[in-house]
Image (cartoon, helix red, strand yellow):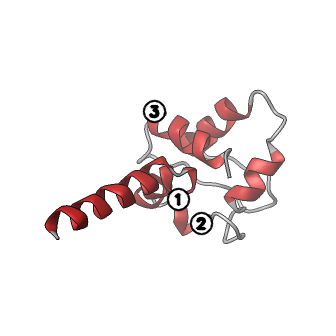
Amino acid sequence: MKRSVFALALSASAIFSASPAFADLALATSKNCMACHAVEKKVVGPSYKEVAAKYKTDKAAAGKLAEKIIKGGSGAWGAVPMPANAQVNDAEAKKLVAWILTQ
């Protein structure tokens, strides 16, 4: 019985860690990104699906978006500016952008 429960837990862990939908949702949540964004709907800022669609063909998007996460920005999505996120370092910003662009 214990062995099957362990196997089930291990399988669930593998599914969630391998699934792009969950890959960096935890990071986005821990860095307060989800206070203004959601995966599928506009909150204060655009949904991550909208961001991915807008930058789908932009080869420079990853760098631009990572910089915007760290430094903030305005104008790309309307009048509400995106504040800088001092909690996010370069590596985390790149990881978040890679995840966002897969939505």
Q: CA distance from mark 1 to mark 3?
A: 15 Å
Separation of residues labelled 2 and 1 (CA atoms): 6 Å
Q: Position of residue 87 (x, y in %)?
A: 41, 48
Between tags 2 and 3, which lies in front? 3
Whether residue 1 sits left or right of residue 71 in the image: it is left
Instruction: Give whichever of discs 1 and 3 has the lower sequence position.
Output: 1
Q: Secondary structure at mark 2?
A: loop
**Badge 3 density bin: few <14, some 14–19, many ≥20, Cα 10 Å:** few
- Mark linked to residue 36: 2
Looking at the rendered image, the quarter that the N terminus falls into is: bottom left
Three-letter residue code for mark 1: Cys
Q: Residue 12: where, in percent of width, then height?
A: 38, 60
Q: How far is the residue under mark 2 from the one under mark 3?
A: 21 Å
Task: Pick whichever, 22 or 68, lies toward us.
Answer: 22
- Give the residue pinned by disc 1: 33
> Badge 1: few (under 14), some or many (20 or more) residues near its Cα, within 10 Å?
some
Q: Residue at x 18, y 61 (%)?
A: 3
What kind of element bears circle 1?
Answer: helix
Q: What's the amino acid at mark 3?
A: Ala
Marks 2/1 in contact by CB < 8 Å: the verdict is yes
Identity of the residue drawn at 72% across and 69% down: 42
Q: Could you tell whether 5 is left or right of 73 in the image?
A: left
Residue at point 54%, 41% (across, down): 70
Name the side, left or right, on which 103 lies relative to 77. left
The residue indicated by pointer 3 is 91
- Whether residue 41 is visible, yes or no, is yes
Q: Amino acid at mark 2?
A: Cys
